[in-house]
Each structure stands twice: as C-alpha cells, then as structure tokens.
Amino acid sequence: MNRQQFMQAMEIHLRPMDPLERAELLADYDQHFELGIRDGTPEEEIARELGQPQEIAQEALGERYHSHMPGTDPFYAATFREMQPLKNSNRATRNFFTAIGLLFLNLMLGIPLGLSLWSVWLTIASLSLLILAPVAAAVDFLLLGHFDKAELFVAIGTFGVGILFVIASKWVFIAFKIVTLQYIKWNIRAIKGDASV
C-alpha cells in the first residue's frame, strides 16, 4: 500500500470522526510519510510500519467505531453526526447503578476518609495558632504585671513552632485539596462512563 492508498483508506475509516480532529490526525500520518521519505524509506514500508488503516481508525474512534461500518463498502461510512452516541435506556440504567454504587462507596469510605484527612489539616492549622504565644505573654505582662524570663523564652519558642505549623498547614492544605478534587473528578468521570485512571 503506497502513501495515497494509505491516506485514502484512513480518510474513509475516520469519516465518523469530527472533521477538525480527523484533519489533525491525517496531517500527523502525512507527516510520518514526509519524514520517512526524507530518510529514504519507501512509501510501502512506511505504510506497513504505521499499521492497517482500519485498526488505526478503530483505536482512534473508540466507542464510535463499528466493525460493519465503513466495512467492506469503501464508498460509505457514517458521518460524524450519524455516529454520535445514542441516548438509550442501557446508558441511563448503567449511569443510575453507577451513581448508586458511588453513593455507597462515598458514604462508607470516601466521606469518612475525606473527613479524617481534613481533620488532620484542621489540627495542624489550629496548632499554627501557637504564633500568638508572644501576644499571650504580652497580655499577661500588661494586665497582670507578671513577667518571667522563662515565660518569654517559651513564648518565643512556641512562636517558632507556630510558624512551622503555618507552613505545614499550607502544604497539607494544597495536597489534600488536590486529592479531594481528583476524587470528585473521578466520581464525575465514573458517572459519565470514563473511570479510567
């Protein structure tokens, strides 16, 4: 199969794809031929290395690909609009049961683990209030007239520890936020039918 035959077969098999997406994919394969020809590789060998157009189209189209279309008739393939996923009761039923399963998963594991993680962050964030230890020592001195050098050193030490907890709470918050958002997005993808990792 030469370059022209390969590209024509790709065009036919990729007809169900969105026109812009198809043009981009075809341009990529055309570029493979350009680079191979520049290196002195024959068109037939490049086509053999790239694979069968039907298999490439099947991989690129995913669920939109049907083995009987375009099939053996090289002059007919469904258009992009014809290949849009049908809204049928099977999909609705699957989505319903997926939602029920996710509800139980979230009630039994997701929410308790999420609350546990966020309570760890809340504990770290509340320990960052140790920054206020010098203020407490100043209030003690101003209102009660009590001053102790040991109390001053403890206030300075807890202020430093409070700064460390502020930094830790910031990074823990960012990490937990990312994990939480990824889990929510995974739930949404699972309901839509794409729960791949």
Image: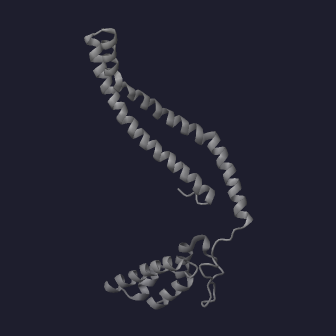
Return the residue nearer the eye: 190 or 158: 158
Residue 98 picture quarter: bottom right
Return the residue nearer the eye: 167 or 102: 167
| Number of numbered discs | 0
Q: Position of residue 52 (x, y in %)?
A: 52, 81
Residue 69 picture quarter: bottom right
Q: Position of residue 7 (x, y in %)?
A: 48, 86
Q: Is residue 103 visible?
A: yes
Is residue 86 left or right of 51 when viewed as pictured? right
User: Residue sitting at 73 percent across and 59 percent down?
Assistant: 93
Return the residue nearer the eye: 6 or 16: 16
Return the residue nearer the eye: 115 or 55: 115
Is residue 153 left or right of 12 when viewed as pictured? left
Q: Is residue 2 visible?
A: no
Q: How is the image coloured?
A: one colour
User: Residue sitting at 63 percent across and 84 percent down?
Assistant: 71
User: Residue sitting at 48 percent across and 46 percent down?
Assistant: 179
Is residue 13 left or right of 89 when viewed as pictured? left
Q: Is 144 drawn above or below residue 177 in the view shown?
A: above
Q: Is 176 drawn above or below residue 149 in the view shown?
A: below
Q: Position of residue 123 (x, y in %)?
A: 46, 29
User: Residue sitting at 32 percent across and 30 percent down?
Assistant: 163
Residue at the outermost left position: 149
Q: Position of residue 125 (x, y in %)?
A: 42, 32
